[in-house]
Amino acid sequence: MTDASMDNPPPARARSLRQADANTRRRNAAEKRFRAYGMVAILTGLFFLTVLFVSIIRSGAPAFTRTVVNVEFTLTQDQMDAAESELFKTKAYSNLFIAALQGKLEERGMSVEFDEAAIERLLGKVGGTLRAHYKEFPDDVGKPVPFELAASSRVDGYYKGRVNRETLQDSRFLQLSDLDLVDALEEAQIIKQAFSWTFITGADSGVDNPGGAGIGAAVVGSFFMMLVVLVLSLPIGVAASIYLEEFAPQNRFTDLIEVNISNLAAVPSIVFGILGLAVFIQFMHLPQSAPLVGGLVLSLMTLPTIIISTRASLKAVPPSIRDAALGVGASKMQAVFHHVLPLAAPGILTGTIIGLAQALGETAPLLLIGMVGFVARGYPDGFVAGFTEPNSAMPAQIYTWAARADASFYEKAWGGIIILLAFLLTMNIIAIILRRRFERRW
Amino acid sequence: MNDMTVMDSTVEAQRTKMAAQNVNVYYGDTHAIKDVNVEIEDKTVTAFIGPSGCGKSTFLRCLNRMNDTIDICRVTGDILLEGEDIYDKRVDPVQLRAQVGMVFQKPNPFPKSIYDNVAYGPRIHGLAKNKADLDEIVERSLRRGAIWDEVKDRLQSPGTGLSGGQQQRLCIARAVATEPEVLLMDEPCSALDPIATAQVEELIDELRESYSVVIVTHSMQQAARVSQKTAFFHLGNLVEFGPTGQIFTNPEDPRTESYITGRIG
């Protein structure tokens, strides 16, 4: 048959292949249009992502710096004895500091009038800080000691543009004359911007001290919550999915469970919060505001996500692998744990990370168990206390800051978001590394 | 091709290894296998032939209870291995499958190294006392699978990286590594090219020395080439069962004749 047709030359076709017909042209045009839509969609996404990042970094970056006054201060033994013998000891120390500061300014030929009240507005209770230092390190007496004193949030604001001369109204916090002093100190290179470790490592401060507020304690709180979520929801979620996917009989009861798991994934998180309040705190009497309770509530929220993604990745493992294992006499459990689960591991890991990331950013359920509004003024004392002592979480801390009146807390909130994103990025990188490791086994 | 007559001389009476008595299989409401009686002999290749959907694969999967994994599948009747009913309540299907190995239609090596593929069965059944023992089992199995020479230098490379024919021979090696008594093959060559098919067929003939082999195949030439006994299935019925030479040259049932000559199927 084929031989016969080879002998004759092919009949001339009506139309050349080189010419696209109308139908082909239409299809090609449609494809081109579709590609263009795709490009536009991606570019739009990238644009908004860039805008987001730029605005977060621009608004948040100032939170990482603070304004400090660097003064080298020498206290002689006589000065110390004299100050200690006075009635208002810290006031005496303050006066010594003012004298020293004025000396520094005069060295550079500048003379600015300022009094103790002005220094207090700028730097807080300097006398107390100095006295505490010399009490703690008596050896420093008589030696020049470099002091780095944090400027008040108003001064900080003056540097970062939140406060300016036109809009400043004299108050007990800051007066116009103080800004002259600040300018003079800047000219003398005594006051400057420095990187603020306090913001990263510190705990939250009161509403009147934005300068001292840090997100460190909240990071620790979030970390402990994530530990609870990971330890609870990963094994429970994976075990539940393996049972449902590989072992459970297909009947109406398991169908019902399946539908409910899907529904749970869509339940608003605040519902889990009120459930946690009722069950964990009011019924089981677990401590309020504790990362343990927060973690439990977030585990409830994360479980459906992990179960759904784990089941999807178990389903994606080809059935021939199960047959192969069963065919050589493996039990069902051996087939699942030796062959199916390792193949599904990367998918399970991805689902877990998505679930954890969701839990990390969740604020609403924390509102109800008292982790918002609570001010973590210190670090938990030890590993166990990390779970049970009251603490905050990063999103809750950000929420608290954003709700405060002082504009410098607003800046802290943005800074907190940068830290939150950095935490998330770290988690993702760990997940990617783990994924690589799992995949390399084949 | 003179395959149709080759096997006559090699048929000798062997003792019965497996016997199916009045076996019926239901998938939900579908009656897939109807009252099948077959005797599978030791050290013999038995071929199941028949058109698609006739139930030959289903029946094969009953022989090592692989159908247990399908919820809606129900089996009645007795299937005996050495006189013991494998569907007895006291029989653990996992233990049974170590005795009745299976090779599947599509090569399905584990996504692990060649060594681990073969070593997996002996490992889970505790057949090797130590590493040297295991090495020996792996080598012996790969030799029996007629693939040793091709892979001996790369035992640690992934089994999924082999060609289709090599993968299927690896799967056969994996199946024989657990020292089964019966080897079931579900269209083992349907995904292979003619050269790989020839290699696998040669291998099947060698395996006959040690095992009872049951092979499901679509290719009648293949059945004629490798088997001593042939069973013809049609619409869930076992139409005819007998020595391969007789089935292909002198079938008793008109349906068998029609299928073999290409009129139905």
Image (cartoon, grey):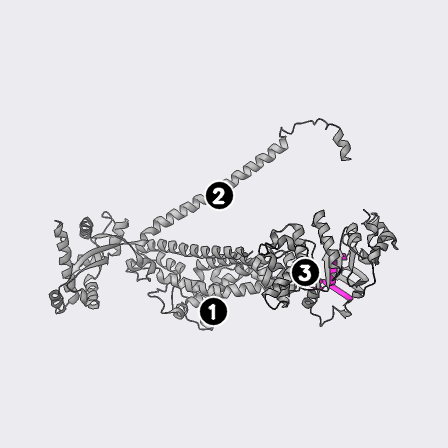
**Are the residues tagged 3 and 2 within 8 Å (C-beta)?**
no
Residue A419 — which label?
A: none
A132 or B29: nearer the viewer: A132
Q: Which residue is drawn at 15% across and 58% down?
A: A98
Q: Say which amino acid is labelled 3.
A: Ala
Q: In this view, does A187 lie above or below A89?
A: above
Q: In this view, does B143 lie above or below B192?
A: below
**SS for callout 1:** helix
Residue indicated by mark 3: B175
Q: Position of residue A42 (x, y in %)?
A: 48, 43
Q: Where is residue A188 in the image (x, y as percent from the top left)?
A: 18, 50
Residue indicated by mark 1: A278
Between tags 3 and 2, which lies in front? 3
Magenta stretch containing residue B77, yes or no?
yes
The residue marked by circle 2 belongs to what chain?
A: A
Residue A42 — which label?
A: 2
| Distance (Cα) linking label 1 and label 3 | 56 Å
Q: Say which amino acid is labelled 2.
A: Ile
- On the image, which quarter does residue B91 sit in? bottom right
**SS for callout 3:** helix
**Are the residues tagged 1 and 2 within 8 Å (C-beta)?**
no
Question: Residue B81 vs residue A395: left or right?
Answer: right
The residue marked by circle 3 belongs to what chain?
A: B
Using the rendered image of the protein, determine whether residue A52 is visible from the camera's viewpoint: yes
Q: In this view, does B251 lie above or below A88?
A: above
Density class for disc 3 (Cα within 10 Å; few <14, some 14-19, many ≥20) is many
Q: Mark 3 and mark 2, same subunit?
A: no
Going from N to C along the chain, the mark reached first, 1 or 2, is 2
A86 or A246: nearer the viewer: A246
Using the rendered image of the protein, determine whether residue A367 is visible from the camera's viewpoint: no
A104 or B215: nearer the viewer: B215
